[in-house]
């Protein structure tokens, strides 16, 4: 295994090179998550999988309201994190379909603890 330091939106590796890509707690912070997902899609082999674990937009409208309200401040104090991104919609819009998708709250404040995790494949 080797590590490279690069932008998620522009990865200088060959297309169709990977069986799987793992994304964890980063789609909230990447400036252009759809561009990053298009790079993931480009890098994955035909039957490759995207495995993900992310936090994001909660399902309840009253929690969403608070997420949207505090999002600008949160982004400034939390390293660029956008806690109100809809991860499910982002992955679908990125050209993937879900093989497995789970969503739930973990312990913590509801505005920051809704989790999305699973596996997606290219369409």
Image: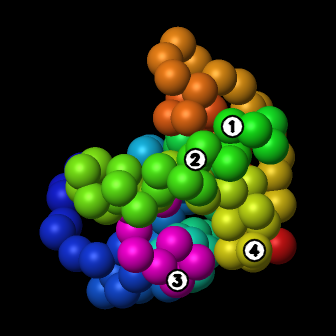
Comparing 90 with 58, the one in front is 58
Q: Earlier in the sequence, mark 2 or mark 3?
A: 3
Q: Which residue is mark 3?
A: 35
Q: Residues within 10 Å of mark 1 (few under 14, many from 20)?
A: some
Res. 59 visible in picture: no
Q: Residues within 10 Å of mark 2 (few under 14, many from 20)?
A: many
Residue occupied by mark 1 = 63
Distance of label 3 from label 1 (alpha carbons): 28 Å
Disc number lying in front (2 or 3): 2
**Neighbours of disc 4 within 10 Å: few (<14), some (14-19), many (20+):** few
SS for callout 4: helix
Query: What is the x, y in percent for residue 65?
Result: 68, 48
Cβ atoms under marks 1 and 2 closer than 8 Å:
yes
| SS type, badge 2 | helix
Tell me, yes or no, whether the two marked residues, 4 and 2, touch with CB atoms within 8 Å. no
Q: Is residue 41 visible?
A: yes
Q: Distance of mark 4 from mark 2, alpha carbons?
A: 21 Å
- Pick the front one: 48 or 101: 101
Say which residue label 2 marks: 67
Element assignment for label 1: helix
Q: Nearer the viewer, mark 3 or mark 1?
A: 1
Residue 68 vs residue 1: left or right? right
Viewer-nearest residue: 109 or 4: 109
The residues tagged by marks 1 and 2 sit, at their Cα atoms, a distance apart of: 6 Å
The magenta stretch is 27-35
Residue holding disc 4? 93
**Labels 3 and 1 touching (C-beta < 8 A):** no
Residue located at (47% from left, 79% from top):
32
């Amino acid at each position: 295994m080797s590590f490279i330091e690069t932008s998620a939106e522009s990865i200088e590796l060959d297309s169709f090179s990977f069986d799987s890509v793992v994304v964890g707690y980063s789609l909230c912070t990447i400036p252009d998550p759809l561009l990053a997902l298009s790079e993931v899609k480009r890098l994955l082999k035909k039957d490759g999988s995207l495995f993900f674990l992310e936090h994001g937009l909660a399902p309840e409208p009253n929690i969403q309201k608070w997420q949207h309200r505090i999002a600008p401040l949160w982004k400034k104090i939390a390293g660029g994190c956008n806690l109100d991104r809809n991860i499910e919609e982002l992955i679908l819009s990125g050209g993937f379909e879900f093989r497995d998708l789970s969503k739930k709250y973990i312990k913590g404040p509801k505005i920051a603890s809704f989790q999305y995790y699973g596996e997606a494949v290219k369409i």
